[in-house]
Structure formats: structure tokens, C-alpha cells
Amino acid sequence: MLKWYGKYMTVVGVLGQFLFYSEFITILSHRSAQDVSLFGFVCGLISVTSWFVYGLLLKDKPLIITGVVATFGAILAVSAILIYR
């Protein structure tokens, strides 16, 4: 049961991080980040990076996979916000 739930959490964790990618695409398509909170996305970046490091320390595959996807997406979103402010 635990192995199955780990796979489930990997899928749910990865899908849940598409907020960052969605916002990145929206910023690029509008070429504006005027109504986007830099503070909020920096907080998100710090949070997902911390979870990623925690996953590495625990050697927990679902946390690592989700952390990679989330951290990369958060970096893209924050970068786009800084570029299109």
C-alpha cells in the first residue's frame, strides 16, 4: 500500500506544481507581470526548494521528483516576473 501511495503522491505532487508553469506561460503570452505578486512567488520558490532539499536528505523519491518539477517551475515563474515587471 505504501509503495502505491508513493506513486500516487508523485503524480499528484507533480500535477499540483503546474501553477508555476501556468503563470509562467500567462506572463510570457501577455508580456506582463503587472498583477502578479513577486513576493508570493518568491515565497513559493523558497518553500518548494526547501521541500526538495528535504526530499534529498530523506532520499524520498516522490519528494525529489516533485521538488525538481516545482523548483524549476518556480524559477521560471520568478524569472518571468522579474523580466516583465
Image (cartoon, grey):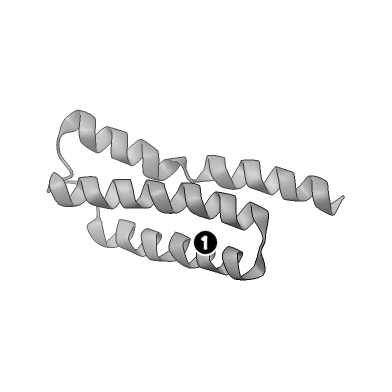
What percent of the width, then of the height, locates residue 30?
Answer: 18, 31
What percent of the width, then of the height, locates residue 23?
Answer: 32, 40
| Numbered disc 1: secondary structure | helix
Q: Is residue 50 left or right of residue 37?
A: right
Residue 36 visible in image: no
Q: Which residue is mark 1?
A: 52
- The residue depicted at 63 percent of the width and 41 percent of the height is 11
Q: Nearer the viewer, residue 36 or 65?
A: 65
- The residue depicted at 24 percent of the width and 57 percent of the height is 38
What percent of the width, then of the height, locates residue 14?
Answer: 55, 43
Q: Please, which residue is most extreme toward the right here?
A: 1
Q: Residues within 10 Å of mark 1 (few under 14, many from 20)?
A: many
Q: Is residue 12 left or right of residue 20?
A: right
Classify 25 as above or below 70: above
Residue 55 visible in image: yes
- The residue depicted at 65 percent of the width and 69 percent of the height is 58
Q: Examine the image and state in which quarter residue 55 appears.
A: bottom right
- The residue depicted at 33 percent of the width and 52 percent of the height is 75
Classify 42 as above or below 76: below
What percent of the width, then of the height, locates residue 57?
Answer: 60, 70
Q: In the rendered structure, which amino acid carries the disc numbered 1?
A: Phe
